Image: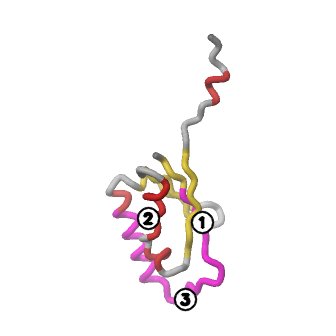
Amino acid sequence: MKILAIERDVEGANWDNAEGLLKSEAQHVFDLYLSDTLREIYFTENKNAVLILECQDKAMAKKMLDAFPLVKEGKIVFDLLELRPYNGYERLIHE
């Protein structure tokens, strides 16, 4: 199942001296990419991360994202959405 994960900052999180934490986050992201669970990652124009994950289900995606260093430190959270195949083409097929 494909999962769309959209990151947002936790309001009031302290980002002072976060360089080491950000490096750990990048390493974690890289490891997930190598494991083929993280399929794509982007930043929005507002610098929020957007991830496309391949997981068994939404609960597994949440568990995986909860292991991110920035999530553990209470600096970010993710909103999760299941991505389902587009079925609009069925409207064009006439029997």
Looking at the picture, does residue 70 appear above or below residue 84? below
Looking at the picture, does residue 14 appear above or below residue 40? below
Q: What amino acid is found at the position of numbered circle 1 in the picture?
A: Asn
Among all residues in the image, which is located at the extreme front?
Answer: 59
- Coloring basis for residues: secondary structure
Q: What amino acid is found at the position of numbered circle 3 in the picture?
A: Asp
Drawn side of residue 44 relative to residue 57, left or right: right
Task: Give the mark, 1 or 3, whose residue is nearer the N terminus.
Answer: 3
Drawn side of residue 89 relative to residue 56, left or right: right
Q: Who is closer to the viewer here, 55 or 43?
A: 55
Residue 47 percent coordinates (x, y):
60, 67
Say the numbered circle drawn on residue 16: 3
Q: Give the residue pinned by disc 2.
A: 63
Residue 93 percent coordinates (x, y):
63, 17
Residue 72 percent coordinates (x, y):
46, 77
Looking at the picture, does residue 79 appear above or below residue 93? below
Q: What's the residue at 46%, 83% (across, down)? A: 19
**Chain part drawn in magenta:** 5-31
Real-space Cα separation, disc 2 to disc 1, in angstroms = 20 Å
As helix, strand or loop, the secondary structure at mark 3 comes to loop
Among all residues in the image, which is located at the extreme top?
Answer: 95
Q: What amino acid is found at the position of numbered circle 2 in the picture?
A: Lys
As helix, strand or loop, the secondary structure at mark 2 comes to helix
Q: Who is closer to the viewer here, 31 or 43?
A: 31
As helix, strand or loop, the secondary structure at mark 1 comes to loop
Q: Give the residue pinned by disc 1.
A: 48
| Residue 91 in magenta stretch | no
**Label 1 Cα neighbours within 10 Å, binned few <14 / some 14-19 / many ≥20:** some
